[in-house]
Amino acid sequence: MNKKTINNKGYSQQNSYNLIEHGLEQISQFVDSLDTDITLKPNIPAIDVQSVPAKMNIQTRDKVSLSLVNKDVVNQGEQLLKMEKRGSPQPVTTTMNVSLDIDSLIEYDPSVSIIKGFEFDYFDKAVFDAFCSLLCAGNRYITLAMIARCMSGKSGNYNPSKTTADNIHQSIKKMMWTEICIDYSEEFDNFKRVQDRTKKKNNKLIIKDRLLNVRYVSARINGADIEAYQPVTVPSLLQYASIRQQINSFDASVLSTPGNKNRNYMLCQYFLIQRICTMKSSHIVSRTILFEKIYSVCPDFEGKKDNQYSYKTFVTRLRKAICSFLEYWKQIKFIKNFKILSEGSVKYHSICIELYEE
């Protein structure tokens, strides 16, 4: 599958290679340099650090990352992902296994909500990418408020609601209790780009770790004593996406869409951003997105179909939010234009995205 990067003339976007060339090693060195002799809460480390806003938001877009939001992946055993180019006679398979220890997590914190088939959804993906963006910006401690600001494109004086903070906190807990194993040996054998990026640092060519390997500590940040997360290792998905050179980057303004967004709206927004960024990276990716595909990222979507009034209200509200996102992205030139397509009696069937071409 031959891919060609599309440079959006209306909106400045870096490709993954330029963004993190030599970056993985620097990030690894940064994480290794963090204090290992740190005192867990309630004691406060003496050093007062300043939070660093992410200059550029990043988003992993490799097959492993994108497959995590699919149903029947988490706790479903070994997954086989085809990596060879289209038409290639040589099959290249990467295996992954994702395990969430639900029993131990619930025992630790009964308030954590886990929905079958949505153990890892686009909200979790947004939290993960925000964490990685802040880590790459050089933050040694990361707070819930910092993640919320990064996810929403808000300024430093924004503090999330309790609901939003709780959702982010639960998401991080799930990722702390989720182990992922990626065996990319065949990619190393067949793809020179992977060989060059790996440099045989992983002798077994396996990445195995928690989705987020962090510890919860107390720290003094910007002069205030606050609880925060400290990374222990570079996130495994960030390592793999860096090796594959498959990381999107975009300005924080893309996330600063209008209106108050509940969790479902945020799910739809991040799904759309992921799809649009994928379109920008390849000419062969379809520019059309089904409305029903967007709705389906919400866990309660299928259940709404049992009640016609509830279903109609649900999709009408989502559709208005989706159109407001697209109008805003058109204004800031993240996309050039969009068109609502109908099919038969369905007025709002799909969306066709127009991008700024080279």
Image (cartoon, helix red, strand yellow):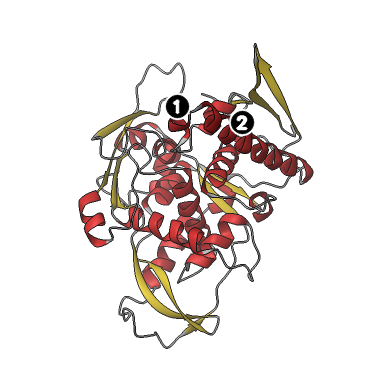
Q: Amino acid at mark 1?
A: Asp
Q: Residue furthest top?
A: 344
Q: Earlier in the sequence, mark 1 or mark 2?
A: 2
In percent of width and height, residue 205 lies at 29, 44
Which residue is painted at 37% across and 68% down in the image?
32
Residue carrying label 1:
306
Quadrant containing the C terminus in the rendered view:
top right
Q: Residue drawn at (24%, 61%), measured in percent from left and top?
A: 108
Q: Foreground residue, 191 or 213?
A: 213
Q: Which of the pair 105/334 is nearer the observer?
A: 105
Tell me the amino acid under the disc marked 2: Lys
Inspect this view and state whether residue 101 appears: no
Question: Is 203 on the left-hand or right-hand side of 214?
Answer: left
Residue 183, position in %: x, y? Answer: 29, 40
- Viewer-side residue, 287 vs 234: 287
| Number of the label disc, if any, that sits on residue 252 | none
As measured in the structure, the alpha-carbon distance from the residue carrying label 1 to the one carrying label 2 is 44 Å
Q: Residues within 10 Å of mark 1 (few under 14, many from 20)?
A: few
Judged by depth in the image, the label closer to the viewer, 1 or 2, is 1
Q: Counting other residues with Cα less than 10 Å from the Cα at mark 2, is it few (<14), some (14-19), or many (20 or more)? A: few
Q: Is residue 213 above or below residue 5?
A: below
x 31%, y 75%: residue: 36
Q: Residue at x 30, y 39 (%)?
A: 74
Question: Vertically, is 47 above or below 64?
Answer: below
Left or right side of 303 for 37: left
Q: Which residue is mark 2?
A: 4
In percent of width and height, residue 23 lies at 50, 57
